[in-house]
Amino acid sequence: MLTLSSRPYLFVDDEFIDTADSVRIELHHPVRRVVAFSFDAPWEGPSSTYCTVLNIAAGSDTGACPFEQPQYRLYYRGMAGDTDLVGECTCVAESEDGVTFRRRNTWKFPACGSTANNIIWAGQNDISHNFAPFVDTNPSCAPEVRFKAIGGVSRHKVFALASPDGLDWHLFHDGPVLTEGDFDSLNVAFWDDANGRYVAYVRKSHAGFRSIDRCTSEDFIHWSKPEPLDFGPGEPEHLYTNAIRPYARNSGLYLGFPMRFFPHRTRFDSVAEKGVSDAVLIASRDGLHFPRHFREAFVRPGLDQRNWTQRNLITAAGMIQTSPSELSLYWVEHYDHHDCNLMRGTLRVDGFTSLHGGVPGGSAVSRPLKLEGTALRANLSTSAGGSVKIGLCDETGKPLEGFSIEDCDDLFGDDLARTVSWRGSPDLSRLKGATVRLHLNLTDADVYSLAAVDG
């Protein structure tokens, strides 16, 4: 049974709605803002990609923002080019606001005759090809290994790494920890608070298509056999990366932003390598089943022709909350061009999808759900003439006295946490723990999330 708690409930699948009339689940798209970082150092270049963004000040890469002195760190792959550093390297840049990033000198590896650069790893075991770090939120994690990472691609081997500060890294285990997979991707790992274990999402091909498998571990060394993600019915697509993370505001919801690859399409005959790509949204409530409710693109290449070449729009692992109302996501643009860069895009908090009703309006009734709070709050947006009303019914659909649609006070405006009231009162204390259905009437309006809170 569904539960409505203080963790916001997002409408990313068909779980919530039982019946609907002129109300649909709508996919929203991040707004391109500014270039957050340009890969223009000699050791970086056109093939820089596979980015991760961490909120290191908050002690977590899952996006929670303390709004005191936030410090964000960007990790990415650089390509050595014509420098004296051979092969690929892992680089870092930092930001106080998550809007633009600047390189941090680490004085560790030589490039162009000097160690005055931002390289933190190079050479060993091809780890820099797809170095993917995270902040370990395991309550039992020792401070000296607070940062962990996975990386590696050659000979089907992925290695585990650890660090006290995210800058000085060492192998966490002598040998590879993952050996079943293709791994030529940005494989990701994290501590899964909801289930109390480490999780890794890795590249694996199935039926000729690039796809994603999941592995789990209790100790970050010994991993389960990979399980293919279940995307439900529909034609398979090449999902090149995954960028899966638990959503910071609801750790039981897993959001991913795979780069979707079309290897045989090309916009320009002059390109050396075929392929075009975009980014899609996938979501799961258990970390294994990701029904493809949205087959359309989450991020399109757009008008910029340099985004219509192969392996563009690889979304960074990790998103951050850059204001009380704004989430920032990042993706690579102009890949394989001289001005390869990391673009920042923004969404409203919880604003990936919504329940949408147009004009003249529509209604939806939820499946039975348990209320775990004494007040109902909605993240909503309407037009000047729009409206949201929410009524409560029993399991059979009969309106509850005093909480019907007719009793609901008209909600209009734009709010991240609007308290719903009925005849002037928001009090649901007598219904806390009860099983109810929600009846929503929406006119030129969107509801992005719902939460049942004590208050």
Image (tube, helix red, strand yellow):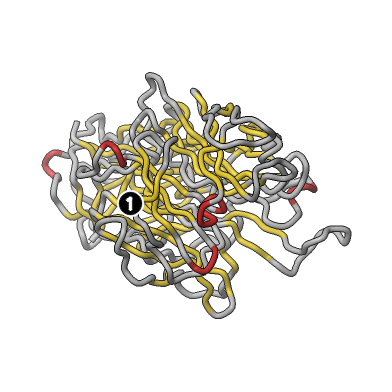
Q: Furthest residue to the right?
A: 270
The x and y percentages for residue 331 are: 60, 44
Q: Tell me: 105 left or right of 12.
A: right
Residue, disc 1: 439
Q: Quadrant of the C terminus?
A: top left
Q: Quadrant of the N terminus?
A: bottom left
Front residue of this view, candidates 120 and 205? 120
Residue at the spot 64% in from the left edge and 50% down from the top edge: 87
The disc labelled 1 sits on which kind of residue?
Answer: His
- Figure check: 144 above or below 282: above
Q: Tell me: 428 left or right of 324.
A: left
Residue at the spot 23% in from the left edge and 37% down from the top edge: 453
Q: Secondary structure at mark 1?
A: strand
The x and y percentages for residue 161 are: 39, 49
Q: Note whether residue 281 is visible.
A: no
Q: Furthest residue to the top?
A: 68
Front residue of this view, candidates 142 and 63? 142
Residue at the spot 40% in from the left edge and 45% down from the top edge: 170
Residue at the spot 35% in from the left edge and 32% down from the top edge: 418
